[in-house]
Image (cartoon, helix red, strand yellow):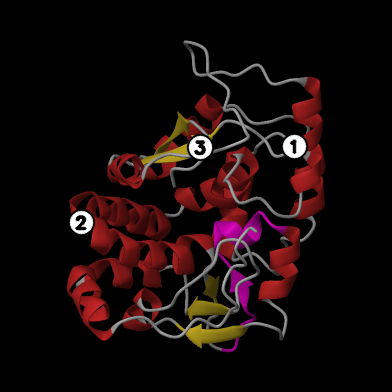
Amino acid sequence: MTAATKYIAHQPDAQGYIDYSEHENQLWQQLYQRQVTNMPGRACPAYLNGLDALGMSIDRIPQLPDIDKVLLAATGWKTAAVPALISFGRFFELLANKEFPVATFIRTKEEFDYLQEPDIFHEIFGHCPLLTNPSFANFSHMYGQLGLAATKEQRVFLARLYWFTIEFGLVQAKDEPLQIYGGGILSSPGETMYALSDKPERKPFDLLDVLRTPYRIDIMQPIYYVIENIDYLDEIARMDIMSMVTQAQQLGMFAPKFEPKAKAG
């Protein structure tokens, strides 16, 4: 999570508020209006309930203290304004303290469809609605605690659990339509449509398989893992995840379902 960035995060004032420019607010409005129309029937009910609960502004970037009031009342979580990219250690520390990191910049128009760095639209629109859900919030808290205590080598495997659940997770109850709960999909119009199409592979969630599945951050995902309902995150939280990490380390990785990234020449 630490790398060079071309984006500069804003610093909040003493009350936690940020004075965004009119241009930045217009970018938020365009992103919000474009993506919110994709949510009905595609986002899981827990996400849509959270979106309603947050009542975020459509025409300007939400202020974190306003988001915090809703999250604290619902699940005891709050946001934490951070630079564009933070270390794994800081990331786990925040989650373990029930603080969700939010980079306080918004993407440029040129990167509307794909952004490698999580911006405020990804964090607030993609993730914060589900932090009003107790199962999602509890799983995120547990994940932070595990990551904080893990070794550098173990964290690489834990990153895959986060990737295939909180970022790119799908949900499908018996005899119900396939829906989305991963914030990486929910904040991306292109991936919202792609993830539910017949193009990618989808498999039932299996912890050991997830820990052994490689991914790339700069492509549409070739594979997604599906849980039966959002409450299943409570079951995952009760699993002996670290013993599974040890097992995954011993078994090694699956062959990637994507081409290796081209080296810059």
Determine which residue is flagged by label 2: 150
Residue 22 horizontal/vertical position (percent): 80, 22
Q: Residues within 10 Å of mark 3 (few under 14, many from 20)?
A: many
Q: Amino acid at mark 3?
A: Val
Determine which residue is flagged by label 3: 102
Residue reaching furthest to the top = 14
Image vertical order of residue 104 relative to residue 163, above or below = above
- In the rendered image, which quarter contains the C terminus? bottom right
Q: Residue at position x 24%, y 72% from top?
A: 245
Q: Residue at position x 70%, y 54% from top?
A: 114
Question: Taking the image as drawn, is residue 2 in sight?
Answer: yes
Label annotation for residue 20: none
Tell me how far mark 1 sits from mark 2, CA to CA.
Answer: 36 Å
Residue 98 horizontal/vertical position (percent): 33, 42
Question: Taking the image as drawn, is residue 239 in sight?
Answer: no
Does the magenta run of residues contain 112?
A: no
Tell me the mark number nearer the camera, choosing from 2 and 3.
Answer: 2
| Quadrant of res 72 | top left
Determine which residue is flagged by label 1: 28
Q: Residue at position x 42%, y 81% from top?
A: 205
Residue 232 horizontal/vertical position (percent): 39, 72
Is label 2 in a helix, a strand or a loop? loop
Range covered by the magenta-colored residues: 175-188
Q: Residue at position x 58%, y 22% from top?
A: 10
Looking at the image, tell me whether mark 2 or mark 3 is earlier in sequence order.
Answer: 3
Tell me how far mark 2 sits from mark 3, CA to CA.
Answer: 23 Å
Task: Tell which of 79 and 161 is nearer to you.
Answer: 161
Q: Amino acid at mark 1?
A: Trp
